[in-house]
């Protein structure tokens, strides 16, 4: 996933309203009116939030007659997961190397048999 795409995804999810919309869509598809229901904002504002989520590739609204459903795009989350997993794996490798270095230092500092501590 490109850096620009990741920036869009994280920027979209940084907003609490959009994050809540994604959370609600995880439970299933919904119309824009259903999505707008709990928020104290205009329908136009809800559409703006959805447009940001669409631009980031997190949701889609298939063409067709109104009311159209908004659908969570699981592929976007799979790509995010793979991107995050790469960083997690590299961090774990660094921690493993650090553990080995610390274990060698600990072994060097331990007294050998016959030595007084």
Image (cartoon, rainbow, N blue to C red):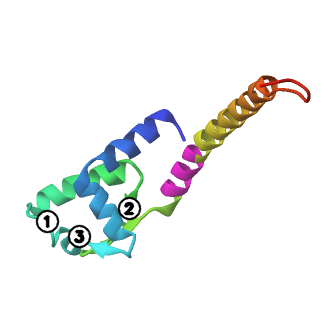
Badge 3 crowding class, 10 Å Cα cut-off, few under 14, some 14 to 19, many 20 or more, is many
Tell me, for residue 35, which label it has, or none: 3
Q: Pointers 2 and 1 in contact (CB under 8 A)?
A: no
Residue 104 lies left or right of residue 77; in this view the side is right
State which tag comes first along the sequence, 2 or 1.
1
Is residue 50 something that shows in the picture?
no
Furthest residue to the right?
114
- Residue extent of the magenta highlight: 76-84
Residue 55 coordinates in the image, percent (x, y):
35, 48
Residue occupying the point 14% across, 56% down: 45
Q: Pointers 2 and 3 in contact (CB under 8 A)?
A: no
Q: Which is more toward the observer, 51 or 86?
A: 86
Tell me, for residue 60, which label it has, or none: 2
Residue occupying the point 33% across, 42% down: 11
Residue 59 coordinates in the image, percent (x, y):
38, 60
Is residue 92 something that shows in the picture?
yes
Tell me, for residue 39, which label it has, or none: 1
Residue 87 coordinates in the image, percent (x, y):
59, 39
Q: What's the magenta bit mostly, secondary-structure-wise? A: helix
Q: CA distance from mark 1 to mark 3?
A: 8 Å
Q: CA distance from mark 2 to mark 3?
A: 13 Å
Residue occupying the point 38% across, 44% down: 10
- Between label 2 and label 1, give the one nearer the viewer: 1
């Amino acid at each position: 996933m490109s850096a620009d795409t990741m920036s869009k995804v994280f920027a979209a999810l940084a907003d609490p309203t959009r994050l809540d919309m994604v959370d609600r869509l995880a439970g299933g598809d919904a119309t824009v009116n259903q999505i707008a229901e709990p928020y104290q904002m205009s329908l136009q504002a809800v559409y703006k939030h959805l447009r940001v989520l669409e631009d980031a590739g997190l949701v889609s609204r298939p063409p067709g007659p109104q009311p159209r459903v908004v659908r969570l795009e699981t592929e976007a989350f799979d790509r995010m997961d793979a991107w995050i997993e790469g960083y997690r794996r590299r961090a774990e490798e660094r921690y493993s190397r650090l553990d080995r270095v610390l274990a060698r230092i600990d072994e060097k500092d331990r007294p050998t048999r016959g030595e007084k501590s």
